[in-house]
Amino acid sequence: MRPCTRRIAPAEIDIKATSLDADLVERAPWCRTAPDALRFTPSLSPASDGWGAIVTDPLQWTTGARLDVALAWEAMRAALLLADPDPHEPGYLERNLSSDGFDVLEAGWSSQALDMVERSRPDMVLAGETELCARLREGEPGRRWDRNIPVIVLTAASSDPVERVRAFERGADDVAARELYPELVARIRAVLRRATAGPADVLEVDELVVDRRSRQVRVRGVPVSLAGREFDLAVQLASDPNRVFTKDELLRDVWGYSGRLVTRTVDSHASRLRNKLRAAGAEIPYVINVWGRGYRLLE
């Protein structure tokens, strides 16, 4: 899937004419020949997974309303990088994900996966190990890839819960058992929906509200006076409140620094932000220092 930034007008949509009744085709002159994957019948929606409101009423098809058909089609063709050298059932996930409409790229080891993320820019990474997730989030000197790319870490159904928690701490968007295939597909589509929705204008985390539009933070309705970088740090942490953001990530995304720096900038701003939230009446601790790793918003 490539980012979808617009809806497609009926005049731009190709529908397989042979799948529609003759009367509908006559009343809908914008229907033309298209790939088989876009076949429609009035009673069937090809995007039952929630990727868009597909209008399947023939009367609505002919009104000229903008449809989400092309949007759903692009979403179904999301590009996934599968970096899971599972020795038990090689090719199982690739075959099934391809059958379900995803474009699947495969990588045999972490270094190859990083090369492919940088070169091919997939929409999501399915990682068989948490270390790959950590390397994607942290970045590497001289390398250029989207460090916010959605990542699902694949585990065994019998995996230790601690392993799942560690995956989230390393920056995973979700964790899924590779053996539970229907659930895995549902999680893939859910994460992709969130990734393409764009950042929310207002972030609410317990008693904390972060308003991007007004650049204001409130604790239980009380405005908190923050400096510019303190607000930006609050936005970053609130965007994923349970995730541990490394100091290198925060220096890059909040301050715009690149490379590894030895500085107390993050620590000093985090301390001031924490103290200001507490002084405003926060009843729970925020801006948690995870020793040796970085910061997260919630305990």
Image: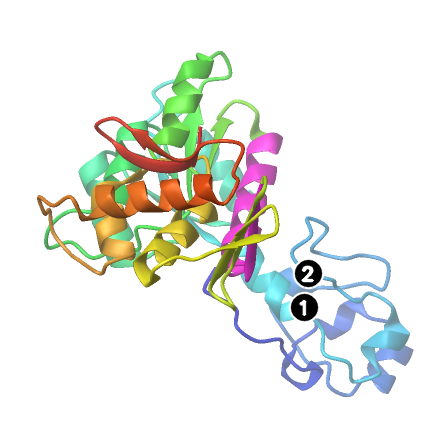
Q: Which residue is mark 1?
A: 69
Magenta-tinted stretch? 182-205
- Front in this rendered view, residue 295 or 179: 295
Q: Which residue is mark 2?
A: 52
Q: Where 128 falls versus 250 (above or below)?
A: above
* Mark linked to residue 247: none
- Among the 4 quarters of the image, the one containing residue 152: top left
Q: Where 57 falls versus 298 (above or below)?
A: below
Residue displayed at 31% across by 45% down: 272
* Marks 1 and 2 close (CB-CB < 8 Å): yes
- Residue 238 at x, y = what percent? 46, 47
- Residue 231 at x, y = what percent? 39, 57
Q: Is residue 110 left or right of residue 205?
A: left
- Front in this rendered view, residue 199 or 290: 290
Residue displayed at 76% across by 71% down: 18
- Front in this rendered view, residue 76 or 150: 150
Residue displayed at 60% across by 62% down: 73
Identify the secondary structure beneath mark 1. helix
Q: Amino acid at mark 1?
A: Val
- Front in this rendered view, residue 99 or 63: 63
Q: Where 179 falls versus 209 (above or below)?
A: above
Q: Is residue 76 left or right of residue 288?
A: right
